[in-house]
């Protein structure tokens, strides 16, 4: 477990918490990597985003958008009028 004390910095309209190299290593994070932030009773939770899952969701969204009409028609097959 790595424990550090950092000051929240304001840059423009955003706020940032600088992370030490030790913290980055302990969390297996790298610059530019996406993370999900959530809170639980005043505790900040940082989780890495599963790159494969995010890529799969993005691909599925593109397919759904491109073939929306076809998917709707396929969903109607077997319906009785």
Image: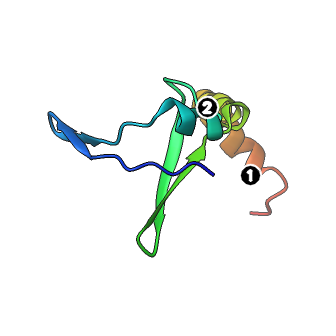
Residue 74 position (above or below residue 51): below
The quarter of the picture where residue 24 lies is top right
- Of badges 1 and 2, the one in the foreground is 2
Residue 3, image x, y percentages: 51, 51
Of 64 and 24, which appears nearest the observer?
24
From the viewer's perspective, tell me whether residue 57 is left or right of residue 77.
Answer: left
From the viewer's perspective, tell me whether residue 14 is left or right of residue 34.
Answer: left
Identify the secondary structure beneath mark 1: helix
Identify the secondary structure beneath mark 2: helix
The residues tagged by marks 1 and 2 sit, at their Cα atoms, a distance apart of 25 Å
Residue 28 position (above or below residue 77): above
Q: Mark 1 points at which residue?
A: 76
Toward the top, the furthest residue is 31
Q: Name the residue under label 2.
A: 58
Q: How crowded is mark 2: few (under 14 residues within 10 Å), some or many (20 or more)?
A: few
Of 77 and 63, which appears nearest the observer?
63
* Label number found at residue 46: none
């Amino acid at each position: 477990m790595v424990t550090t004390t950092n000051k929240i910095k304001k840059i423009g309209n955003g706020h940032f918490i600088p992370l030490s190299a030790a913290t980055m290593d302990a969390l297996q994070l790298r610059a530019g990597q996406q993370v999900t932030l959530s809170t639980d009773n005043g505790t900040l939770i940082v989780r890495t985003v599963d790159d494969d899952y995010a890529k799969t969701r993005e691909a599925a969204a593109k397919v759904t958008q491109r073939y929306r009409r076809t998917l709707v028609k396929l969903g109607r097959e077997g319906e009785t009028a």
